[in-house]
Image (cartoon, helix red, strand yellow):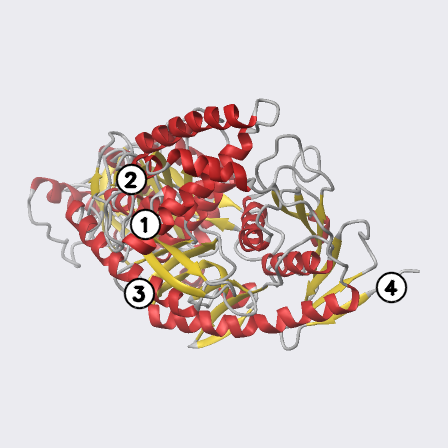
Amino acid sequence: MEQKFSVEVPDLGIKISTGDIAKQANGSVVISLGETNLLVTATAAGALRDGQDFFPLTVDYRETFSSAGRFPGGYFKREGRPSEKEILTSRQCDRPLRPLFPKGFMNEVQIIGLLLSADMVHDPDVLMVNGASAALLISDIPWNGPIGCVRLGEIDGKFIVNPTHEQMQDSILDLVYVGNEREMMMIEGSAEEYPEERFIEALAFAQEQIQKIIGAQRELARLCGKQKREFPLIVCPPEILDMCKEYVGGRLLEAVFQNEKLKRQADVDALMNETAEVVKSKVGEEKFDLAHVKMAFEVLQEEVYRDNILDAGKRCDGRTFVDLRPISCRTGVLPRVHGSAIFTRGETQAMVITTLGTSRDFQELDGLTGGTKEKSFILHYNFPPYSVGETGRFGSPGRREIGHGALAERSLLPVLPSEDEFPYAIRVVSEIMESNGSTSMASVCGGCLSLMDAGVPIRTPVAGISCGLVTRKDESGKITKHVVLTDIIGAEDHYGDMDFKICGTKNGITGFQLDLKIEGLPADIAREAILRNREVRMKILGIMKEAIAEPNKDLKPCAPRIKIMQIDPEKIGMLIGPGGKNIRRIVEVSGADIDVDDDNPGRVLIYAKSAESMNRAVSEVELVTGEIEVGKTYRGIVRSIKEFGAFVECLPGKEGLVHISELADFRVNKTEDVCKLGDEILVKCIGVDDKGRVRLSRRAALCEQQGIPYEPRPRDEKPRGGDRGDRRFRRERGDDEDRRREDCE
């Protein structure tokens, strides 16, 4: 008989239940907030793969269109490859789960989250982390949880827990916080130049809030939790470790402590291969396992890095704990592109390129969970294998590349100008040329320089840097000694305990991400890292300022130009024309792109690649939508010949009368003596009465062209036609009131 168990999280509206679906998984829960429901399962393989020497944890979050009552787009009408949102949510869940599995546990574990229903109000990403924790906790899989996760916003000085999409539009903070019962586990998010002290307050507040979620999970485990199974732990045999340690002696220290990454790797690999042959000769070929030697060298390298940092105060490249690697910056490094920069920090280098586009280049988001539907700013991060001196897969981006690009994107977004101020689509691409730690932070710094080189009027420059951590614990697991490292290299990230990336301006934080390899980060160490990061960030901003102090005032010659025109909203239809005929003609004759802003009535954006193209497009739009203005000169077409003058079309559909007395600077007996039907003549508007009747003068236009003062005709000077001409003008313009007056006369 099925038995369902459920718990609720006090004050947060979250409900977690289990026992009625997906019962063959090791653990499964349905977690809900509002009408958003998410199924999360945890499953572990019963046996190891042959030759397996790593822990294969896979976290997959998937959204189904049916959860929002929609059909997928495209021919096949079914979900395809994971979206960027799904990948980022999967990574967000993976990172805090991974450190809590026992060391040496190698059985494959798979966490799958399936969005069952979406209310388009609450984001399921926070539910995914909490659901995964609950599913693992009640399962028989060994895991040292639980953890809790909340999203924290701030509106009008007040913290908001798990804000809705609508509330997030007004929030100056987007903090996803994950922690255990004692300490922080993982954070990521963005902010609008958030002060460091306020950021520390937000972390403390979030730590308090997750205790409610952790308590609910503990209660669910008490009701229906399974007994944890015994899985074999794969560790290096002590005798193999001793053999390797005895043989390498101090040679490993010599191999590790040198400046060049590739030389360091080559020397360590050579020493490991040499040691493997010695171990093989001692244990015999039948009992020899190369994987044991590799594990032994992982242990030995970890000891070398950590012990020298903690006890001798030495880093492998000779820096102190607070030193940055040498930094160099260059802008304008590529021709033809709209903006470019190279940012180099030690053996980490990013070439970053900025491209400006029109609103047609905005990225449409086909998300199911609410929020924005399109993006005008995109940052892509590419990590080719040559950047680490290796061969490998090269093509579509992996999860790591998508995650690093998202971090850099949200760190730069807060300083970008509004679309009203700078209505371009902006794409930034970071091509990693070399990698030895913190390439995402190099992408932020290089991206900022590239934007400034492109002439994007950012509010203030942004820089980013990563801080690391090495700790020593006693038998109870309490940290007894620690060192916070500035600007960690790849090996310090691998063998250390923390990778804490923070980006920001001189005014505050704009983006952040924390990953741990230990089971929690104490608040005092987090504070130390945050303040250290600010201090170092100021130095990097100073170096960047030497390369380019402020955004370029002008766009690059090859960049598209833009002009914003505001026209009468009632004339938008006239601009577009039947079936888009008019606007297509303007685009064709000018070579410019024209966008009509549907959200801002009457706003027209013109993009062009040359001044000539822009001027032609503006002129054509004005011709279609403008009004004849007093004092302006027009090249018009004679549309009607009358005894008293000529009607001239100055703008499409807009006419005025050139009275016979204004056709020339001499007496004109017949209108046809000066112009004929269809002629193109130069005229100047000399008046528009309160009924919209336009008076034009060819004589005034000719005087202006020749630099001669124009003098209007005396009012008592009656040209041929006299008052009859005026009356016929009124009839020709269709003035009903004047026609009735004439009928009465």
Q: Of callouts 4 and 2, which one flags the residue occurring earlier in the amino acid sequence?
A: 4
Residue 424 appears in the figure: no
Q: Cβ–Cβ below 8 Å for labels 2 and 1? A: yes
Please tell me which residue is depicted at 42% across the width and 33% down the height of the picture: 585
CA distance for labels 4 and 2? 59 Å
Describe residue 210's horizontal placement relative to residue 194 as left or right: right
What residue is disc 1 on?
308
Using a 10 Å C-alpha cutoff, classify the residue at mark 3 as few (fewer than 14 neighbours), some (14 to 19) or many (20 or more).
Answer: some
Q: Which mark is residue 531?
A: 3
Badge nearest the viewer, 4 or 2:
2
Badge nearest the viewer, 3 or 2:
2
Tell me if residue 119 comes above or below residue 699 in the rendering. Answer: below
What residue is disc 4 on?
3
Describe residue 205's horizontal placement relative to residue 463 as left or right: right
Between 665 and 263, the one lying in front of the other is 263
Q: Of callouts 3 and 4, which one flags the residue occurring earlier in the amino acid sequence?
A: 4
What residue is disc 2 on?
257
Q: What residue type is labelled 4?
A: Gln
Q: Cβ–Cβ below 8 Å for labels 1 and 3? A: no
Position of the C terminus, as image quadrant, is bottom left
Q: Which amino acid does label 3 sit on?
A: Leu
In which quadrant of the rendered view does residue 612 lie?
Answer: top left
Q: Residue 90 carries which label?
A: none
Using a 10 Å C-alpha cutoff, classify the residue at mark 2 as few (fewer than 14 neighbours), some (14 to 19) or many (20 or more).
Answer: some
